Every structure is written in C-alpha cells, then in structure tokens.
Image: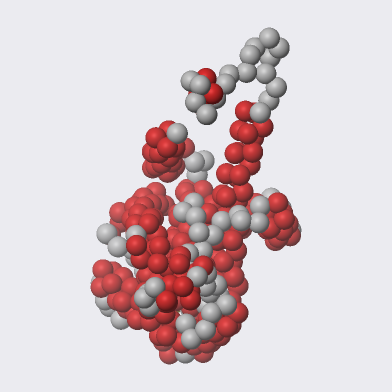
Amino acid sequence: MMGNTVTNRIIAAVVALIVAASLPLWLPGTYYTNIASQILFYAIFALSIDILLGYGGLVSLGHAGLFGISCYTVAVALTAGWSHGAAIIMALIVTVASTAVFAVVSLRTTGIGFLMITLAIGQILWGLAYRWISVTNGDNGLTVTGRPFGKLLLSPEGFYYATLVTFLVVFALVVVFVRSPFGAALAGTRDQPRRMNALGFNVWMTRFYACLFSGLLAGVAGVLFVYYNQFISPQALALTASAEVVLMVISGGAATFLGPIVGAALVVIMKNVASAYIARWNFLLGAIFVAIVIFMPDGLVPGSRRFVAWVRERHAGAPRPAGKPESLPESRAEGKP
C-alpha cells in the first residue's frame, strides 16, 4: 500500500511538471500565460507565510511589508545604475536583514500579540513607502526598466519559464525544510512549546530561524513581482495584500505543500479571469471562502483528500452481488486467531 502511494505521488508530480512546462503551448493567449506567472510567484509568497502559519502556528499580517522591501530594493538599486544580478542579491540580503528585525520585535509574544505586532510593522513599512518620497517616489511608485538576461525574459513565455524554474527550486527547498529535523522541531514549537523547551530546544531561536527562511521566500516572490509588473507602489505593502495571501494559505490548506499553491491559483484566477465576466467577483470570492470554512475547514487540499477517502470507503463498503461469498480476512482463512 505504501509503495502504491509513493508511486502515485511520483506519477502525479511528473504529470504536473509536464503540464506546467507545456502550459504556454496550449493556453489561448499571452494573457493567460501572464496569469500562470502570477500564480507561481504568489504561490511562493503563500509558501513563505505557510512556513510561519502552518508549521509554526504564527499568523503574520505584515509579510507584505517584507515583500515590498524586496520590490523597492530592486527598483532603487536599478534606478541607481546597479546591474540586475547585484540588485537581486541586494534585495534578498536587505529583506532577510529586515526580517531579522521583524522577528526580534514580533517574537516577543505569540498568538494575537504576534498578529498585532506584525500588522503594526506592516503598516509602518507601508507608511514609509507612502511618505518617503525621496526614495520611493510616494504614491507614484517606481518604474523598473528591463529584466535579467536581456531579451530572454521580455516575452511572457520567457518570464513564465524563469518563474517556473524559481518556483520549483523554492518548492524543493520548502519540502526539504519541512521534512528536516528543524522542520519537525518547528512543528513541535507550534504544538507543544513548553515540552520542546523542557526537551532542550530553544523555542525562540527555532521560530527566529523560521522567520528568516520565510522572509527569504517573501523576498524571492517580491523580486519576481517587481520584474513582472516592472513597477512598484505602496499598494503592494498594504494590509490587504498581507490578508489576501493569508487567505490563500487558509483556503488552500495550511501546513500542506499544495495548499498555498491551490489557494494562490484560486485568488489570482478570481481576480484576473472571473472578474472579466462577473462584476461582483469580490462577493463570489467571499462566498467561496465562507463555503470552504464551513465544509472544508482545514482547506481545499485536506478537504478534498478526505472527500476522496470517503468516496473510496463508500465504494468499498457497497453491497456485494448475490451468491458471491464474502472473503475472509487472511488471518481467519489461515486459521490464525
């Protein structure tokens, strides 16, 4: 049974990779290729929040600030004449350094306290982006000219494949992180912090390192975002941006690998595709969130797995045809107790 499960997962992963690699070939236009790119970098952003929310039990409403720091660092560095490679490296360094300060301040507490501190920090960063006009150009934002690797990433298809490769690398890092001893320790600090502390684990430091990794992923998503839009404004740091990505994680399923990806796909498709046909798409998206909370409180991915398991159990428990004897369990057939 275990071997069949592993084989099925490998087959599903290969099929998903083939579909993702061939996506620009069969999508109806470049617009939908751009939508696919958005899903991928928002999925990276959602994975960064899932590290804290799903595996660490820490709900952050200020991650859009870290996301925006990465965006603005790239834009400011390019405006100053830096190369794309140097701007990207600097953006990741500045984002991780900012995350360290973010974590030192917010990890003084957990639960609602952590949520409120991260919300306050996010609002402070949004205010800086809005008011520090000499650096951020205020509400007018900053424009990014060009993309790395010359003309290779200027086309929607080229940018999509670059985003796909980045996403696969990030996804592999998240899988290794979660399944490592450190990932198990982080889950332990979520479920039994006092017991983990009694066992000799430094709970605060474990959460601090998780915040750094989460900030790094948010920085990667920010780099892709600013190169995709070739523009950044304070709106990217707003509270609504953080809340939107938290909803992606919750709706898809926290503490799962696929949940943030499914949630990102749901929100991005509703915002960019369904909104073209439905005027009140916000109402529809809210109704979908309410339905998920009521019928699949753990999220779409865990809920779908339970539904499939329920269907299989019902199918396995269906009445047998008349005249067909019911097979005995193996132990009873061999005369074992």
Residue 15: where, in percent of width, then height? Answer: 42, 37
Residue 277: where, in percent of width, then height? Answer: 69, 50
On screen, residue 205 versus residue 34, left or right, reads left
Up/down of 331 relative to 291, above or below: above
- Disc tally is 0
Q: Quadrant of residue 185?
A: bottom left
Question: Would you say residue 264 is visible in this rendering?
Answer: no
Residue at left 46%, top 87%?
105
Residue 55: where, in percent of width, then height? Answer: 48, 64
Residue 111: where, in percent of width, then height? Answer: 57, 77
Residue at left 49%, top 41%?
27
Q: Quadrant of residue 97?
A: bottom left
Q: Foreground: 158 or 115? A: 115
Q: Foreground: 135 or 107? A: 107
Up/down of 89 relative to 304, above or below: below
Question: Would you say residue 101 is visible in this rendering?
Answer: yes
Residue ranking furthest to the top = 323
Residue at left 57%, top 55%?
252
Q: Foreground: 75 or 109? A: 109
Q: Quadrant of residue 239?
A: bottom right
Up/down of 248 relative to 120, above or below: above
Q: Foreground: 102 or 23? A: 102
Up/down of 304 relative to 204, above or below: above
On screen, residue 151 versus residue 53, left or right, reads left
Q: Quadrant of the N terminus?
A: top left
Q: How is the image coloured?
A: secondary structure
Residue at left 34%, top 57%?
176
